[in-house]
Image: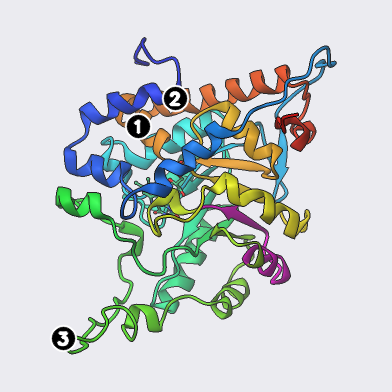
Amino acid sequence: RIPPEVAAVSDYEPLARERMTQAAWSWLQGGAADEITVRENQAAFQRLRLAPRVLADLAGGHTRLTLLGQSFDHPVFVAPVAYQQLAHPDGEMATVLAASALGAGMVVSTQAGLPLEGLARQAKAPLWFQLYVQHDRGFTRELVHRVEAAGYRALVVTVDAPVSGARNREQRAGFALPSGLSAVNLRGAAQLPPHTAPPGTPPLFGSPLVETALTWRDIAWLRQQTVLPIVLKGVLAPEDAVRAADEGLAGVVVSNHGGRVLDTVPATIDALPAIARAVSGRLPLLLDGGIRRGTDVFKALALGASAVLVGRPVVHALAAAGAPGVAHVLQLLRAELEMAMALTGCRTLAEIDQSRIWRGG
Ligand code: FNR
């Protein structure tokens, strides 16, 4: 069931494209505006060079880690991606099964097409829940309690998309959710009142969306509602990461939402070093955006991340080969990470540090 010609993660991309409609493909691949950040996420990894070491003792090496008090076999996680049934009829269920088979952490999107309880019942590795705080805060509180009751182990609160980005590729392709697919876990949430500003006034400022957008006060409120650790997803500024530590949050995902919200922000791997310096170990950092190789995972860890999340490649494999494909992508990234560790003389993730990035000279 694994296509025999697949040797690397990127080999799933053309296979997925053949299987998805053009509109769904623009939704999956596309980013904001001119997609400069989408490309830059990968290009920035490709610009970095590794510094190999020889004759290091590799005996007893492994890729295990502890994050938020939870044990993982390796640092490659599945990023939250909405509506996975656009790629494969099994949708998020296939991804959960694959992540479990590979011992990979997975973050389930608020906009999953399947009920969060059913997904949690099938999971054998820890699941985290990605939360879009709803305008209806009462509904949000109930949702968080459902998430806790279902056994999720952390809340990943996405904070980089209070308003939608200019998703031009999607608009040009006329993408719309097919009937029968919806964010089932949000059923019953009160919707924002429609924006009734007179014509000619600015479209965003003054609108209910912006007037009720999430602030640090809401994050403090959310902490009161839950026993789960809270991780902020979508941080690029060192000041915001420091504030997250000051507020007692459990972690930060350095992310630009895969380039889907604001175009021309930097690649995540370029933003990471300054953030790592600023927080200096006060809270763990995760990173996503552009991870396509085990060497990318290695570079993120070398520059200060504890783990990474992978978005589009997981969905490519899901579209091409269902759950076995997703498991294969996670396996490939882990195997390539181990190769990079062995060839740079790193026995454990803790040994992957900045000295393994080539500085020239
Ligand atoms: C996303 N992402 C996302 N993030 C989130 O917090 N909630 C969500 O529902 C979604 N949905 C979503 C759909 C699609 C189609 C994509 C491509 C991405 C962002 C995702 O979690 C992650 O930040 C990026 O995908 C990482 O970049 P790569 O790995 O796709 O390059």
Residue 167's spot in the image, x, y percent? 28, 56
Q: What residue is pinned by disc 2?
A: 9
Q: Which label's residue is closer to the chain start, 3 or 1?
A: 3
Question: Where the C terminus falls, by quadrant?
Answer: top right
Beta carbon at label 1 within 8 Å of ligand 1: no
Mark 2 neighbour class, 10 Å CA radius: few under 14, some 14 to 19, many 20 or more = many
Q: Is residue 86 above or below residue 176?
A: above
Q: What residue is pinned by disc 3?
A: 199
Labels 3, 2: front one = 3
Outermost residue, bottom side: 198
Determine whether the residue tagged by mark 1 lies in a helix, strand or loop. helix
Beta carbon at label 2 within 8 Å of ligand 1: no
Q: How far apart are marks 2 and 1 (CA)?
A: 9 Å
- Horizontal side of residue 113 vs 281, given as left or right: left
Q: In this view, does 217 lie above or below 231?
A: below
Q: Toward the viewer: 179 or 77?
A: 77
Q: Which label's residue is closer to the chain start, 2 or 1?
A: 2
* Tag 2–tag 1 contact (CB < 8 Å): yes
Residue 301's spot in the image, x, y percent? 68, 38
Mark 3 neighbour class, 10 Å CA radius: few under 14, some 14 to 19, many 20 or more = few
Q: In which quarter of the image is residue 21?
A: top left
Residue 82 in magenta stretch = no
Question: Residue at left 60%, top 68%?
Answer: 226
Q: What residue is pinned by disc 1?
A: 316
Q: Distance between the residues labelled 3 and 1?
A: 42 Å
Q: Is residue 188 above or below residue 255?
A: below
